[in-house]
Image (spheres, rainbow, N blue to C red):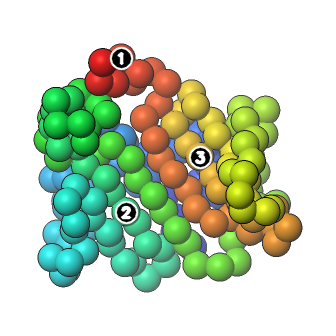
Amino acid sequence: MTLGISLDEPSKAKGWRDIQPLHSTRADVERLLGPPTDKRDCIYNICTYYLHDVNVQFNYSPGDCKSGRGAWDVPPDTVVNITVHSGPGLRWSSLAIEKAKFMKKNIGHIQNIVSYLNEEDGLLIEVNEEMDEVMGFYYLPAARDKHLRCP
């Protein structure tokens, strides 16, 4: 699988395939992946790409803090976060994660599903612990970018 992260050290990932929240743009995504193949794959500021090994969703900034839809003070079409879902079979135990850098959080209403969050790097990994399966990778703004949050 080519998830765009190092399966040996996903916590050292710099975004997904070098697309970084709050630093990369829609143009950067389209240089890497091309435009979405179907206009229905982009709704509002969210575009989804269905690749052979993963599904990737990019959430773009509307470009202002005033609309109430943007939580980040960045230009329009700036990547705000990225969600990556692989096919079944990626084992949590197979990832060489430095767990000390991640904070474990129970999602609450869904039994056995937990999140491991590295706020410093902006990476959240959702895991079904009972099945030892990674459900998704969420690339978020890193701690160093908190100054860009809307007031």
Q: Position of residue 108 (x, y in %)?
A: 72, 51
Q: Which residue is mark 1?
A: 147
Mark 2 neighbour density, 10 Å: few (under 14) some (14–19) many (20 or more): some
Q: Residue at x 46, y 41 (%)?
A: 140
Tell me which corner region of the image, top left, top right, bottom left or bottom right, holds residue 73: top left
- CB atoms of marks 2 and 1 within 8 Å: no
The kind of secondary structure element at disc 2 is strand
Horizontal arrangement in the rendering, residue 40 relative to residue 113 (left or right):
left
Q: Residue furthest right?
A: 130
Give the residue type at disc 1.
His
Depth check, front residue: 95 or 146: 146
Q: Is residue 31 left or right of residue 92?
A: left
**Residue at the spot x=37%, y=78% of the render?**
50
Query: Where is 9 relative to 126, above or below?
Result: above
Residue indicated by mark 3: 124
Mark 3 neighbour class, 10 Å CA radius: few under 14, some 14 to 19, many 20 or more: many
Tally of numbered tags: 3
The residue singled out by tag 2 in the image is 57
Expressed as whole percent of the image width and height from the top left, the position of residue 66 reads 16, 30
